[in-house]
Amino acid sequence: MKDYIEDRVIKIANYIIDTNATVREAAKVFGVSKSTVHKDVTDRLESINPLIYEDVKKVLLKNKAERHIRGGRATHMKYKSAKEGNSLP
């Protein structure tokens, strides 16, 4: 594996651990796709650094368990905004 890929994988993993970021948030920060972040932290990271992999895995599982809450909150805000006179996107 290329050195720059390993470096990116470690940086993304540390960012996710430090900030409890979602895959989508990490992708925006690092300027890569969600697919790239997901592959980096689920496939590549395990062989690069198994200890960090376990920590990232915990954050990703937590985020997955909470995603229905974030989705519900986003929908609530969307319709609240529309009710107040703003148009829907």
Image (spheres, helix red, strand yellow):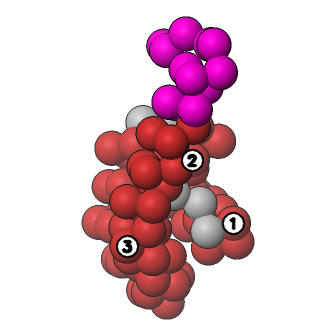
Query: Which of the 4 image quarters holds residue 61?
Result: bottom left
SS type, badge 2: helix
Could you say where residue 20 lies in the image, as x and y percent from the top left? 61, 68
Does the magenta segment cover residue 81? Answer: yes
Gap in angstroms between the C-alphas marked 1 and 3: 17 Å
The N terminus is located in which quarter? bottom left
Q: Is residue 23 left or right of residue 44?
A: right
Q: Residues within 10 Å of mark 2 (few under 14, many from 20)?
A: some
Q: Earlier in the sequence, mark 2 or mark 1?
A: 1
Residue occupying the point 43% across, 51% down:
72
Gap in angstroms between the C-alphas marked 2 and 1: 10 Å
Nearer-the-camera pick, 52 or 84? 84
Nearer-the-camera pick, 13 or 26? 26
Q: Residues within 10 Å of mark 1 (few under 14, many from 20)?
A: few
For residue 53, say whether it is visible.
no
The residue that label 3 is drawn on is 65
Task: Mark 2 and mark 1 in contact? Answer it, CB < 8 Å.
Answer: yes
The residue that label 1 is drawn on is 19
Q: Earlier in the sequence, mark 2 or mark 3?
A: 2
Nearer-the-camera pick, 38 or 84? 84
Residue occupying the point 49% across, 55% down:
70
Q: Which residues are magenta?
A: 78-89
What amino acid does circle 3 point to?
Ala
